[in-house]
Image (cartoon, rainbow, N blue to C red):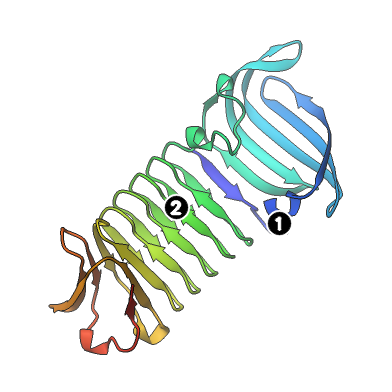
């Protein structure tokens, strides 16, 4: 399991801030059996230093890690933390943890936390828990029975495969359970719930036309009242259930394709 935190605390910088920077020479700040800390100078829209600190249990050759295991990663820009990853185990031979091999060290049951800025959270395999925090977050649980919460802001929350629990939180969110049997909550705001042919069974527990909620359907469908619920049926086992909703209350463009 890995625990990932983007912009923890009150950080006001993001990865977008460093996209156009000029990167200077790299220096080794610390190199021992438990820590490898690297520092690069930066210039451009932001001036200062970018620190990458790897934690783990390393074997050393000439005072530099050449084997062992990575167990943590922290990225700081001018002493503000952009990213922190803990509670994972990645063999040294697989290369240091970064965005090129995150599917390796995020392949278990992981916890991913966004913060005040706009985040992209990717779950990969395993039973993952994600919280977007504030900002416009894009979240995808991928495989596994995941729990996703967009938090504040207009978020994109997708469950991926398997049986997920999704919450948009406050804001106008786009929420898709994708494949599997999912439980979906939009939270406050005008949300769009998406379903497509072959998606599975999704149950929306707080659909509110009064708040501006809508359903986006990809495929041919029928709508009917089944007991206390509205059922949108795409056949072959694909349904979206609007729990506790009367079809007579659904006016205007509440459903579209």
Tell me the CA gap for discs 1 and 2. Answer: 23 Å
Q: Is residue 204 above or below residue 91?
A: below
Q: Position of residue 65 (x, y in %)?
A: 68, 18
Residue under the image location 21 percent in, 61 percent down: 238
Q: Quadrant of residue 137?
A: bottom right
Residue under the image location 38 percent in, 78 percent down: 213
- Find out whether the residues at labels 1 and 2 contact each other: C-beta distance under 8 Å: no
For the residue pair 143 and 222, the one nearer the viewer reads as: 222
Left or right of 19: which side holds 1? left
Residue under the image location 66 percent in, 31 percent down: 54
Q: Residue furthest top?
A: 61
SS for callout 1: loop
SS for callout 2: strand
Q: Is residue 175 above or below residue 127?
A: below
Q: Quadrant of the C terminus?
A: bottom left
Q: Quadrant of residue 92?
A: top right
Q: Which mark is residue 151?
A: none
Q: Which residue is mark 1?
A: 11
Q: Residues within 10 Å of mark 1 (few under 14, many from 20)?
A: some
Q: Position of residue 43 (x, y in %)?
A: 86, 47
Q: Position of residue 11 (x, y in %)?
A: 71, 56
Question: Reading the chain from its start, which is encountered first: label 1 or label 2?
Answer: 1
For the residues carrying marks 1 and 2, which lies nearer the camera in this image? 2
Residue under the image location 47 percent in, 62 percent down: 156
Left or right of 202: which side holds 210? right
Left or right of 23: which side holds 173? left
Q: Residues within 10 Å of mark 2 (few under 14, many from 20)?
A: many
Instruction: Confirm whether residue 28 shows in the render.
Output: yes
Instruction: Confirm whether residue 14 shows in the render.
Output: no
Q: Position of residue 223 (x, y in %)?
A: 19, 76
Q: Which mark is residue 140?
A: 2
């Amino acid at each position: 399991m890995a625990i990932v935190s983007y912009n923890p605390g009150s950080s006001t910088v993001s990865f977008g801030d460093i996209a156009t920077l000029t990167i200077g020479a790299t220096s080794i700040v610390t190199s021992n059996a438990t820590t490898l800390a690297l520092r690069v100078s930066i210039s451009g829209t932001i001036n200062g230093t970018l620190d990458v600190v790897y934690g783990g249990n390393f074997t050393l050759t000439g005072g530099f890690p050449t084997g062992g295991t990575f167990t943590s990663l922290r990225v700081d820009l001018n002493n503000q933390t952009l990213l922190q990853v803990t509670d994972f185990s990645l063999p040294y031979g697989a290369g240091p943890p970064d965005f090129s091999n995150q599917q390796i060290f995020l392949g278990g049951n992981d916890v991913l936390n966004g913060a005040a800025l706009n985040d992209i959270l990717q779950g990969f395999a395993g039973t993952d828990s994600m919280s977007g925090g504030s900002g416009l977050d894009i979240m995808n649980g991928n495989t596994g029975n995941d729990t996703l919460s967009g938090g504040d802001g207009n978020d994109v929350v997708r469950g991926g495969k398997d049986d997920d629990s999704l919450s948009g939180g406050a804001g106008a969110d786009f929420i898709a359970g994708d494949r599997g049997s999912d439980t979906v909550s939009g939270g406050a705001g005008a949300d769009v719930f998406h379903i497509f042919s072959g998606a599975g069974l999704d149950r929306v527990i707080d659909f509110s036309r009064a708040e501006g909620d809508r359903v986006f359907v990809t495929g041919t469908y029928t709508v009917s009242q089944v007991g206390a619920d509205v059922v949108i049926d795409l056949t072959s086992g694909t349904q979206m259930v609007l729990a506790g909703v009367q079809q007579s209350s659904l006016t205007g463009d509440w459903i579209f394709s």
